[in-house]
Image: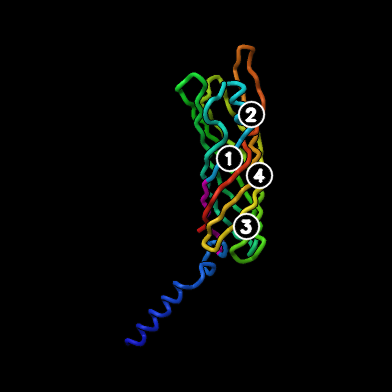
């Protein structure tokens, strides 16, 4: 009996000590991925500066995201999901601030350069947007389909880091003294984020 218990304990310790790559989410058929990051958007900052005399904030968006990761092969994953991006801006000569957000449904395709982790990967994304703003005399609406491209590195434990670019078209209407001005602004930009798959 003691020998059996010793054998079971040895097998258990051996399995715990095995490489993480044996059980990473990337080798499952379906997993989940969550992320957090920042979008640096100079076009969005310029829009705010032109119409609202922006003083603080407005250089981009902080965001979190989640998706379901379907691993269709050792190297290819399809990831439908959504991002939620948020910022707060204040203005010259005022202590008031406004909050703006974008809900971003998306689908991404990821290709890992190696079948086993760790590995570099490239990712392409299509997105739509549902924006909202507290900006006075201004409205935001979806400007249609956007896109993005990323390059990243995924570790054995499912952690990943990414950098790239997102185009997020948003229709903007601003009421001014001279009438309503309408345009489509890119509220995306350069992206850096970190995520984990499980």
Pointer 2 or 3: first along the chain: 3
Residue drawn 62% across and 61% down? 119
Q: Are marks 1 and 4 in contact (CB under 8 Å)?
A: no
Task: Classify mark 2: helix, strand or loop.
Answer: strand
Q: Which residue is mark 1?
A: 39
- Residue pointed to by mark 3: 77
Asked if the stretch drawn in magenta spans residue 33, the answer is yes
* Numbered mark located on residue 148 in the image: 4
In x, y percent, where is residue 60?
57, 35
Residue for point 63% across, 41% down: 190
Q: Quadrant of the N terminus?
A: bottom left
Of the numbered discs 1 and 2, the one sitting upstream in the chain is: 1
Q: Secondary structure beneath disc 4? A: strand
User: In the rendered view, does 100 fall on the left or right side of 127?
Assistant: left
Q: Position of residue 53 (x, y in %)?
A: 57, 21
Q: CA distance from mark 4 to mark 3?
A: 16 Å
Q: Is residue 88 magenta?
A: no
Closer to us: 80 or 102: 102
Q: Which residues are magenta?
A: 28-36
Which one is earlier in the sequence, the residue at label 4 or at label 3?
3
Q: Position of residue 54 (x, y in %)?
A: 55, 24
Work out how far the residue at label 1 is from the one at label 2, CA to CA, in angstroms. Answer: 18 Å
Tell me the CA gap for discs 4 and 2. 18 Å
């Amino acid at each position: 009996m003691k020998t059996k218990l010793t054998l079971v304990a040895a097998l258990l310790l051996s399995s715990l000590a095995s490489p993480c790559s044996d059980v990473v989410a990337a080798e499952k058929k379906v997993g989940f991925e969550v992320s957090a990051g920042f979008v640096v958007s100079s076009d969005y900052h310029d829009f705010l500066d032109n119409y609202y005399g922006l003083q603080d904030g407005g250089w981009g968006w902080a965001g979190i995201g989640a998706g379901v990761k379907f691993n269709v092969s050792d190297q290819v994953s399809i990831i439908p999901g959504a991002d939620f991006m948020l910022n707060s801006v204040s203005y010259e000569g005022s202590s008031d601030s406004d909050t703006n957000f974008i809900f971003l449904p998306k689908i991404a395709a990821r290709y890992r350069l190696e079948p086993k982790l760790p590995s570099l990967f490239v990712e392409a994304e299509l997105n739509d947007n549902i924006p909202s703003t507290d900006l006075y005399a201004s409205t935001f609406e979806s400007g249609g389909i956007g896109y993005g491209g990323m390059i990243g590195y995924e570790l054995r434990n499912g952690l990943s880091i990414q950098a790239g670019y997102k185009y997020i078209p948003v229709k903007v209407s601003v009421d001014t003294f001279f009438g309503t001005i309408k345009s489509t602004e890119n509220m995306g930009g350069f992206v850096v984020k970190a995520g984990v798959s499980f």
